Image: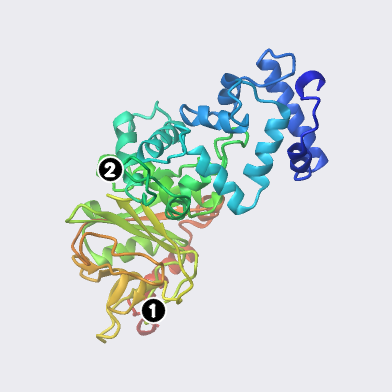
Amino acid sequence: MGNAQSPTADPRFATASRAFTKNELEDLRSLFLSLAAQSQSNGHFISPSVFKTYFGHRDPLGDRMFDLVSQQRKDQRLTFHDLVIAKATYEKGSKDEIEEFIYLLVDVSGDDILGRSDLKSVLSAMFETIFSEKDTELGSSSHKDIADIFLNAATFSKHVDGSAEKSMSFEDFRNWCTLLPSVRKFLGSLLMPPDPGKLGSQVPCLLHQESVDPNTMLLRKEYAWHIGGALSQPELEEWKLLYHSAYNGQSFNTFLGNISNDDGPTVLIIMDKEGHIYGGYASKRWERHGDFYGDMKSFLFQLYPKASTFRPTGANNNIQWCAVNFSSEDIPNGIGFGGQVNHFGLFLSATFDQGHTFNCTTFGSPCLSKTSQICPEVIECWRVVPKGAQRRHDAVKGTVLERFKEDRHMLNMVGLANSSE
């Protein structure tokens, strides 16, 4: 490395080096030399512009990341030691060490006060990176609106001397990241090589029929990115619109008929007459049950006016609810998530014109709307198509066996399978 390193031994570098394998260190050295060559520094350091261009960082987030990685020396030089020490902490450290690094990162003003303006700058830089400015559906005003929705999930409880405005404490920040896993994933992958499928950057491709006007859909790309933060990478390939109340009619039977033709997880989204948008991810197929079912992969979410995600707490197993054509008042007909019978975390009655949302220990979620009683204005349901599943589905689509399975499932949904035999 020649003069790339200080002659004085740095114990932090020695410790950080032990976090990597020999091959990983060699790869880091090769990356450093390549970027240093582009920086025209004779192999000594990486310049800010080359660093930000390679990792795809936007200002001011890129400036702050370079400042932290170069150990805030303000000399505009990032050495090999700097890179190894930063990546050892940021990627190989404990959960606390990584989140403390990210907490410092989002304080883009560098004044040790994490305020609303810092987070707004970070979110704007994120959205400009994730969503191409060539996308005609988006623009600077859209980024600002979405940033506000994510900011509405934040808590600022730390007192600041000489200021009436409070800042975000480290605990506030950790809670915010829990509510917004997509943000946490993105902020935790900023030193990874550029890749369209990089953790925190992937946005599902939203598929719908040509007759559906995209402007009438509740699920925007930014919302899909937010929901996808709680899912695995293979589940972020394609999402297909199965049901939209404006096009298919606000009917429970139509809803069941449309979703019965597709296996796998779904995303249910509701906009009520108060203008609030929220819903749930159902990991299991919607099918007729007289009790709760499902697994711990399901979750609830809010999209507007606040973005949040609520995953199972383990308090109980009351995950999904789908009751069809039951006559008992103890088994309310409709679909829902979490909570208890008649006191769900989210519930749509079989009439599809009313429902409710209550505080829910199943997901640790609050009431998702302005009031607990809701009147749906628009209802959507999207099929999550995992990577490779589309090809398998197309291979059997339209066969006699497949049509029989679909018809059979629909009969099961409405409780008529046995009577048809």
Closer to the chain start, of discs 1 and 2, is 2
Say the numbered circle drawn on residue 289: 1
The N terminus - image quarter: top right
At mark 1, the secondary structure is loop
Q: Which residue is mark 2?
A: 211
Q: How dense is the environment of label 2, judged by Cα within 10 Å: few (below 14), some, or many (20 and up)?
A: few
Dot label at residue 198: none
203 vs 346: above or below: above
Task: Tell me: 141 left or right of 124.
Answer: left
For numbered disc 2, what is the local secondary structure? Answer: loop
Question: Which marked residue is nearer to the observer: mark 1 or mark 2?
Answer: 1
At label 1, which amino acid type do we have? His
The C terminus appears in which quarter of the rendering? Answer: bottom left
Which x, y percent locates residue 248?
A: 24, 55
Camera-nearest residue between 405 and 244: 244
Nearest the viewer among 118 and 239 is 118
Amino acid type indicated by mark 2: Ser
Q: Percent x, y for residue 52?
A: 56, 25
